[in-house]
Image (cartoon, coloured by chain):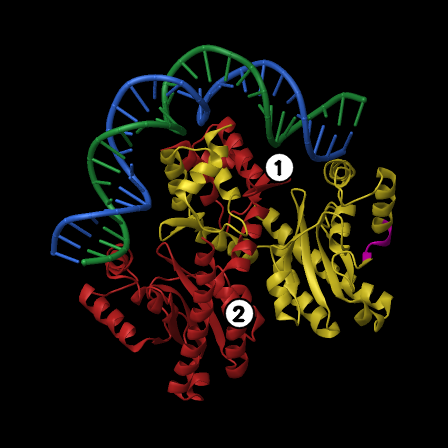
Chain colours: A red, B yellow, C blue, D green
Amino acid sequence: MSSLNKMLNVLNIFGPGSLIINVDDIAKKLSLSRATAYRYVRELCDAGLLTRIDTSYTLGPRIIELDWMMRQHDPLISHGREVMADLSKNTGLTVYMSVFYDGHIINTHIESDIKKYGFTFGRGRPLPIFKGAQSKVLVAFQKPNRLKKIYDEQIEPSDDYNLTWKEFNSETKKIRKDGFCVTHDELNLGLTGIAAPILNLENDDIIGSIAFVGTTSAFELFRFEAVVERLQEATARIEKGAHLDNEKVTDKT
Amino acid sequence: MSSLNKMLNVLNIFGPGSLIINVDDIAKKLSLSRATAYRYVRELCDAGLLTRIDTSYTLGPRIIELDWMMRQHDPLISHGREVMADLSKNTGLTVYMSVFYDGHIINTHIESDIKKYGFTFGRGRPLPIFKGAQSKVLVAFQKPNRLKKIYDEQIEPSDDYNLTWKEFNSETKKIRKDGFCVTHDELNLGLTGIAAPILNLENDDIIGSIAFVGTTSAFELFRFEAVVERLQEATARIEKGAHLDNEKVTDKT
DNA sequence: ATAGTTATTTTCATAATATGAGATTAAGCA
DNA sequence: TGCTTAATCTCATATTATGAAAATAACTAT
């Protein structure tokens, strides 16, 4: 194992339950000498990924700043923010934007009347790989070789799922054919979600998803087709916006 | 320079204007061989700090997830969120929470009617070290040796400031005496800010600040003392909440 | 599906540096 | 201003990071 790898492992020991750690504990947990632990911590502090609190260490300001930069320049967010706010305002439902990133699914933006949701389920909230409308859309639209990889690595070996490759394959095929996905009670009891993909217009790769989420009884008020239509209008607008950005960038070169 | 340092330098070249970079450019910018650049990028991708897009690389999902974790477990945010939302609702002003971190000042939470503010000035937005009410409060309440260090390293050498140590010292002393700070037009023309410190009740160290920000004309509506009082009620509540958390944690050990 | 292209990893010898134990210095605190 | 604890430095040695080129893997387009 390289020193680079060992140093980056320091970040892994920060989690709920241990957010502030002193150097001796870091050394112990990663089987490093005190001197080496101090060296790693110093490098990470210099980079801003860690910071000192009294005589212990915790995650640093650089993380917050980098996330801000990512948010500022994310074309999906900049084109989707207002669109999503409108959807939320007009329906009273919560609207999520989510992405697939290295085999992980996370929310990247939320628009909701309920402030608490923004805190708990907002940007950065990890989601299971194939539960809930967002996740399923994001997975279903991956390229065939990726789909297989996801199944082999994350669905098949997991106790949370009980899907044969055939079942998985036909479920994703249906989602691709429909162009959206509806789920009930998969992430939270009593909640329904409807998600649609955001595609890259140049090559049809999926780059994100938008979802309506609300109580199942709230959804009973709506005409299903109308909700899907609104969702797809929204994704279409975001797709076009991101596409235009792309053209501008490629023009420069 | 250590390999650790060189690897972490890769993160520095991602910024507005260059958010997606290919390995050859990384190698060139940091004077690394192709092989080494690939090695660094691989380590950073494995850690989730970078991620691949097509054949280039960009900041990764780990940053978003780490920020989410920091937000979830930040005692100031969890105790301040609702308090701040109430302040904002009752006044129509924007309410900021900010912290001092390694010589940098950043916003960590915002409550505002104006959604756009949340995007642009929200969590992660860097602030100048001694302009605006938040920054000034956060600096003024630092311990004397830190105060001197901040002046020497960031105020005195900067063209943005024209303060002698004596002036700086008396300005911070006044802020400490008042227990709050008011500024006009320092960050944005036409805006006024009022900030108060959030202190650690055990040792009186400053751990953050809360600020009202709004147009100067909006402030004319309010009785100044009443606004300050509301602000200090809010900081007192957050201080007590954080203090209780602390006691719980120390009880465990 | 397959060839052709480009991106990425591996190999290997060597130079560079990461490492640990203890000594030294700096920082924090009463 | 001392006094305690945290952090850095020193130095010899083992470890590994490095670059150039070759091998492989991942895409693309047919």
Q: Position of residue A189 (x, y in %)?
A: 41, 74
Residue A87 tag number = none
Circles 2 and 1 on the same chain:
yes
A220, B222: nearer the viewer: B222
Q: Is residue A216 above or below residue B221?
A: below
Q: Position of residue B239 (x, y in %)?
A: 71, 56
Q: Is residue B229 above or below residue A152?
A: below
Q: Is residue B123 left or right of residue B170?
A: left
Q: From the image, which quarter does the N terminus of chain A lie in?
A: top left
Disc 2 crowd rating (10 Å Cα; few below 14, some 14-19, many 20+) is some
Residue B9 in view here? yes
Q: Chain of mark 1?
A: A
Q: Chain of mark 2?
A: A
Disc 1 crowd rating (10 Å Cα; few below 14, some 14-19, many 20+) is few
Q: How far apart are the two marked residues, 2 and 1, measured between alpha carbons?
A: 41 Å
Task: Give yes or no for residue B179 being in the magenta stretch.
Answer: yes
Q: Which residue is mark 2?
A: A81
Residue A157 in view here? no
Task: Give yes or no for residue A137 being in the magenta stretch.
Answer: no
Q: Is residue A52 above or below residue B226?
A: above
Q: Is residue A45 left or right of residue B197?
A: left
Q: Residue at x 57, y 42 (%)?
A: A48
Q: Which residue is mark 1?
A: A55
The image quadrant of residue C7 is: top left
Q: What's the amino acid at mark 2?
A: Arg
B114, B14: nearer the viewer: B14
Is disc 2 placed on a helix, strand or loop?
helix
Q: Position of residue B136 (x, y in %)?
A: 77, 50
Q: Position of residue B24 (x, y in %)?
A: 40, 41
Is disc 1 placed on a helix, strand or loop?
loop
Q: Which residues are magenta?
A: B177-182
Q: What's the amino acid at mark 1?
A: Thr
